[in-house]
Image: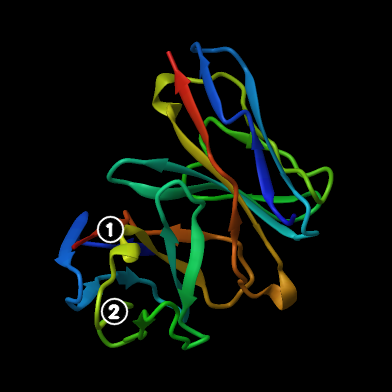
Amino acid sequence: EAQVTQNPRYLITVTGKKLTVTCSQNMNHEYMSWYRQDPGLGLRQIYYSMNVEVTDKGDVPEGYKVSRKEKRNFPLILESPSPNQTSLYFCASSLWEGGGYNEQFFGPGTRLTVL
Amino acid sequence: AQRVTQPEKLLSVFKGAPVELKCNYSYSGSPELFWYVQYSRQRLQLLLRHISRESIKGFTADLNKGETSFHLKKPFAQEEDSAMYYCALAHGSGNTGKLIFGQGTTLQVKP
């Protein structure tokens, strides 16, 4: 089944303890992206990647890192999480044909709580 | 700065009534605009994009460059339309992967 998977789905951690949220897609998509969803703020883009080893900042990259060593995986890394990173995180992927935008397929979300 | 505004957090209508979810954008270039929907306990998914000019599930949206709007409309709401709706803007040049979402509007269709 074509899909985007995220792990873990739920995570409670403490301030300063490094964590990684994994994202994987099996659709051979070039484009992948991370978003956070907060009440009243909607979805905000954290980082995106247009292909392997190509990443760029979205609107709210502070406090996050990403890497794209393989086409299918796009992990989100929080080196030193803080309570203001408590949020619902979504990963998405899409084709990147000719540089245009295509339908993004979203993962199920990861609910992160930082105490 | 690029921005997408959805002025209504919640829109509540009765079944059979017309629906219009508002979306206004701020962008100096030629935008690509989308509507995404999230039904209860389902993943966020694309509803429609302006360049395809399709009608999906009875919904349509027209890009009005003069008013910088991309409102989502449906003539007769159904209970199954109840969901969270997001308007999103991408750079029309396609050379950047930035995508900007609005704050979202919850549509509640009452029986």
**Residue B63 in sight here:** yes
Q: Nearer the viewer, residue A112 or A63?
A: A112
Give the residue drawn at x 29%, y 77%. Answer: B71
Identify the residue position indicated by label 1 in the image. B105
Would residue B38 appear left or right of A53 to someone viewing this image?
Answer: left
Return the x and y of residue B111 as percentages of the image width and height. 18, 63
Q: Verify CB contact (< 8 Å) between mark 2 and mark 1.
A: no
Query: Circle 2 marks a residue in which chain?
Result: B
State the quadrant of the C terminus of chain A: top left
> Residue most toward the front?
B111
Seen at 49% across and 12% down, the residue is A15
Q: Quadrant of the N terminus of chain A?
A: bottom right
Quadrant of res B24: bottom left
Left or right, residue A94 beside residue B29: right
Residue A13 spot, x, y in % from top left: 52, 14
* Percent of width and height locating residue A82: 46, 20
Check disc 2 and report its element: helix, strand or loop.
strand
Q: CA distance from mark 2 to mark 1?
A: 13 Å
Is the residue A86 above or below the residue A90 in the image? above
Q: Amino acid at mark 2?
A: Lys
Q: Amino acid at mark 1?
A: Thr
Q: Which residue is mark 2?
A: B73
Q: Where is residue B99 drawn, in percent x and y?
A: 51, 61
| Residue located 28% across and 88% down the image | B66
- Disc 1 secondary structure class: strand
Crowding near the residue tagged with mark 1, few <14, some 14–19, many ≥20 C-alpha atoms within 10 Å: many
Q: Is B88 drawn above or below residue B29 in the view shown?
A: above
Does residue B1 appear anywhere in the picture? no
The answer to whether B58 is drawn above or below residue A73 in the figure is: below
Drawn side of residue A4 relative to residue A15, left or right: right
